[in-house]
């Protein structure tokens, strides 16, 4: 088929908003894979699947059998899909729990318990058709009642849901409705053209649970996934066996064994000893296996980032010139190459990672400019710089990043003192007034991957955002968010995104100097390990290399 004939065929698939994307593809502004990802976003799931995207029904032939052995950190509390927040618990949930949609790092939105979805003309009502015949592990069939109850639970302020901040201003209690046993509608608080991401694995709490779920998940791990519980031992680990009644391709491994570790170094020792097949990855652990052919580093590009917030309502950061000056001291390429060993891409002080199709690539990239930083400080009345304390968490590479920021800031006369706290102390109660994260003048916070910038834009920067550590309140920004949410096609989204990116560069309420890759370390003897950049660990396609 010629390119012209292909374009003509694509135009017949849907309406005007799809054809705008087709025009961008024809003009070379949109890659084919991004076009297919957009097809899935607006509900053309059948077309996306026909082009080779997705896992269900397309598994390659591989030898079945065996046990996959996984090392994870310690869950921070009881494993409950409604309240879970830590990577270890998300990894465990991945074996048994499923979402309406999987946001796959490679292929984008993939149908899981939802077969298809579509929005009305306003993008304020979204309707989802459910996959028929799906059963929970206890044998009951999944219906719209279970789906609605799952989301009503997540948006209920009294449920203890960890997803409240993600849904704030998007979906409220009463917004999920049963249309019929196989159809669910969501009436949103405001228009949102990216809503499918909000019911996907991007909101890791959005596992579909029985309508009568009573918060006792650890008793039976009752989900719909490819594995079902064999045994669970708090603080020790869990094991799962293949689910013979799974709706999709049956899992290749017979079993999954997960062991919890208090120390990450112990995980790599167990991997090296042949006791584990898969573990999480950190820069320190990667050095331990570097150059060893018995192990491999698996990575996906993500929108994960460590955001530096600057309190816009407290001196010295009430003046945006001071905020911009600090941002201009950073050499982003040096940070990517040095701190992150090249496994990241430079950020531009907005949540719009380059991997998002809606990001406007024409917005100029901020680069290190010490002379301009000094000029801005002088203009703001602090020509000799100032002293400030940077408060952050003792996690991942963040303490090292804090030292790098400290050293770069010195070049412009900014004297940064470091206050590095244990993670639980840093987050506190995660509410304003009792959380160093949300109350500190200057801080660094890690944010996990999302498939769309919406959650970051709303939760961290909107005037009433639950994660707005910068205390940034800007009516123009809030209005632009509404415009971005209403944009129905990629071209309109990119125009709205460009305005947001430009405003945030000018205001600089936060500094985002990089977007990290997300990695796992695996034995060379296993193939088919898949994962998302938000800690899901998908092991149903794992097979073992024969010696």
Image (tube, rainbow, N blue to C red):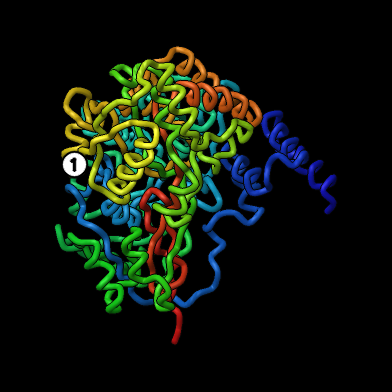
Query: What x and y, as percent, mark residue 16?
Result: 71, 28
Point 79% across, 47% down: residue: 6
Q: Point out the residue furthest to the bottom here.
A: 547
Res 245 seen here: no
- Quarter placement of the N terminus: bottom right
**Residue 382: horizontal and vertical position, in percent?**
35, 20
Query: Residue 285 or 133: which is nearer the viewer?
Result: 285
Tell how many labels: 1
Residue lying farthest to the top in this orientation: 475
Q: Is residue 105 above or below residue 274?
A: above
The answer to whether residue 338 is visible is yes
Q: Which residue is mark 1?
A: 421
72 displayed left or right of 536:
left
Mark 1 is surrounded, within 10 Å at the Cα level, by few (under 14), some (14 to 19) or many (20 or more) other residues, namely some
Q: Quadrant of the C terminus?
A: bottom left
The residue at the point 34 percent across, 51 percent down is 97
Q: Position of residue 484 (x, y in %)?
A: 54, 24
Determine which quarter of the picture holds residue 510. Answer: top left
């Amino acid at each position: 088929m010629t390119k012209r004939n292909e374009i003509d065929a694509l135009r017949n698939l849907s309406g005007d908003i799809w054809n705008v994307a087709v025009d961008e593809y024809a003009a070379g502004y949109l890659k084919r894979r991004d076009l297919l990802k957009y097809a899935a976003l607006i509900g053309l799931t059948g077309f996306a699947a026909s082009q080779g995207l997705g896992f269900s029904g397309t598994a390659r032939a591989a030898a079945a059998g065996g046990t996959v052995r996984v090392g994870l950190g310690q869950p921070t509390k009881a494993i409950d899909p409604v309240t879970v927040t830590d990577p270890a618990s998300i990894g465990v949930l991945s074996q048994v729990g499923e979402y309406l949609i999987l946001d796959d790092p490679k292929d984008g939105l993939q149908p899981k318990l939802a077969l298809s979805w579509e929005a009305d003309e306003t993008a304020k009502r979204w309707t989802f058709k459910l996959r028929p015949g799906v059963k929970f592990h206890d044998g009951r069939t999944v219906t719209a009642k279970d789906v609605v109850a799952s989301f009503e639970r997540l948006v209920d302020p009294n449920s203890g849901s960890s997803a409240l901040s993600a849904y704030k201003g998007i979906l409220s209690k009463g917004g999920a409705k049963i249309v019929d046993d196989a159809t669910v509608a969501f009436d949103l608080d405001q228009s949102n053209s990216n809503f499918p991401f909000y019911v996907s694995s991007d909101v890791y709490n959005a596992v579909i649970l029985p309508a009568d779920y009573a918060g006792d998940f650890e008793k039976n791990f009752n989900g719909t996934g490819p594995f079902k519980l064999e045994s669970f031992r708090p603080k020790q680990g869990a094991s799962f066996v293949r689910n013979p009644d799974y709706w999709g391709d049956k899992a290749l491994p017979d079993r999954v064994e997960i062991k919890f570790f208090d120390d990450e170094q112990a995980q790599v020792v167990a991997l090296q000893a042949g006791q584990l097949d898969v573990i999480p990855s950190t820069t320190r652990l990667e050095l331990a296996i570097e150059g060893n052919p018995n192990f491999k580093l698996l990575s996906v590009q993500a929108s994960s980032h460590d955001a530096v917030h600057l309190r816009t309502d407290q001196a010295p950061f009430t003046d945006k010139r001071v905020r911009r000056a600090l941002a201009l001291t950073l050499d982003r390429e040096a940070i990517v190459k040095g701190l992150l060993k090249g496994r990241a891409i430079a950020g531009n002080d907005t949540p719009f990672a380059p991997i998002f199709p809606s990001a406007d690539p024409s917005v100029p990239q901020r680069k290190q400019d010490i002379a301009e930083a000094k000029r801005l400080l002088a203009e703001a009345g602090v020509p000799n710089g100032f002293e400030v304390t940077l408060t952050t968490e003792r996690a991942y590479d963040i303490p090292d990043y804090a030292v790098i920021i400290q050293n770069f800031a010195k070049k412009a006369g900014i004297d940064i003192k470091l206050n590095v706290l244990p993670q639980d102390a840093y987050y506190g109660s995660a509410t304003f007034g009792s959380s160093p994260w949300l109350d500190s003048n200057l801080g660094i916070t890690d944010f996990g991957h999302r498939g769309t910038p919406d959650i970051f834009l709303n939760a961290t920067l909107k005037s009433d955002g639950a994660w707005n550590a910068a205390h940034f309140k800007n009516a123009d920004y809030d209005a632009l968010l509404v415009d971005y949410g209403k944009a129905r096609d990629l071209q309109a989204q990119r125009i709205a995104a460009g305005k947001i990116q430009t405003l945030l560069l000018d205001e600089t309420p936060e500094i985002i100097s990089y977007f990290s890759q997300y990695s796992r370390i695996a034995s060379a003897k296993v193939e088919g390990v898949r994962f998302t950049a938000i800690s899901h660990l998908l092991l149903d396609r794992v097979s073992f290399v024969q010696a």
